Amino acid sequence: MKKRGRILLSEGGLPPCLPLLSFPDIGDDSRGHVMADDPAGEWLTYDEAAERLGIKSDSVRRRAAARKWQRRQGNDGRARVLVPLNAIPDSTPVPIPVVIPDDPGLVARLAVAEARLTDALQTVAEGRKALDDMKADRDAWKRQAEALASRPGWLTKLLGRYR
């Protein structure tokens, strides 16, 4: 036994009058607080929880504080909260059945819309072709103007004779 202050301590560091208890389901976080591992939740950082819950990390902080979720420091120094499993949405979305009614008026309007869309796409393609043709014409006119600018003009030729 060691003497520490006025209290005698056993080899385990506890006073001899206290029994040494073991709690297999309890862990010790990095700050020395004893916390039980809850199987009904998942320890996540605020960023991980935000991604899983589909909200911002600040919202996770507010939700964790309001709902008093357990918080602890991880080995990497980042804070982790115990997010209950019932708070984490299922990752598989529920399929939404597509129901197309047998309304003849709706089918007719859909056919008209498809025809108009086809016409609009064809008009866009023709407009693009016309634009490409205009760009080619512009480039040809530009080359011709540059060629003419490099040659002496008629006034230069005329004045050049009288020098």
Image (tube, rainbow, N blue to C red):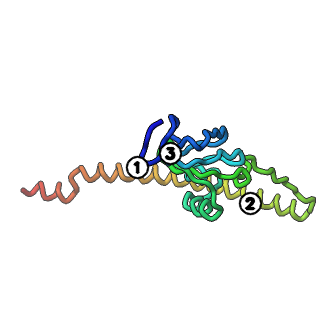
Question: What residue type is disc 2 on?
Answer: Arg
Distance of label 3 from label 2 (alpha carbons): 67 Å
Residue that carries the numbered disc 3 in the rendered image: 30
Q: In this rendering, which labeled residue sits more in front, label 3 or label 2?
A: 3
Residue 140 circle label: 1
Residue ID at (47%, 46%)? 7
- Give whichever of discs 1 and 3 has the lower sequence position: 3
| Mark 1 and mark 2: Cα distance apart in space | 36 Å
Front residue of 88/106: it is: 88
Q: Name the image quarter holding the C terminus.
A: bottom left
Identify the secondary structure beneath mark 2.
helix
- Front in this rendered view, residue 89 or 79: 79
Q: Amino acid at mark 3?
A: Ser
x then y, percent, for residue 93: 76, 50
Instruction: Kindly identify which residue carries mark 2.
Output: 116
Q: Residue furthest left?
A: 163
Q: Secondary structure at mark 1?
A: helix
Type of the residue with mark 1 = Ala
Please tell me whether residue 56 is drawn above or below residue 143 in the rendered image: below
Q: Nearer the viewer, mark 1 or mark 3?
A: 3
Instruction: Give the residue at x 56% y 57%.
Output: 57
Q: Are marks 3 and 2 in contact (CB under 8 Å)?
A: no
Mark 2 burial class by Cα count in 10 Å: few <14, some 14-19, many 20+: few
Closer to the N terminus: mark 1 or mark 2?
2
Residue at x-position 36% and y-position 52%: 142
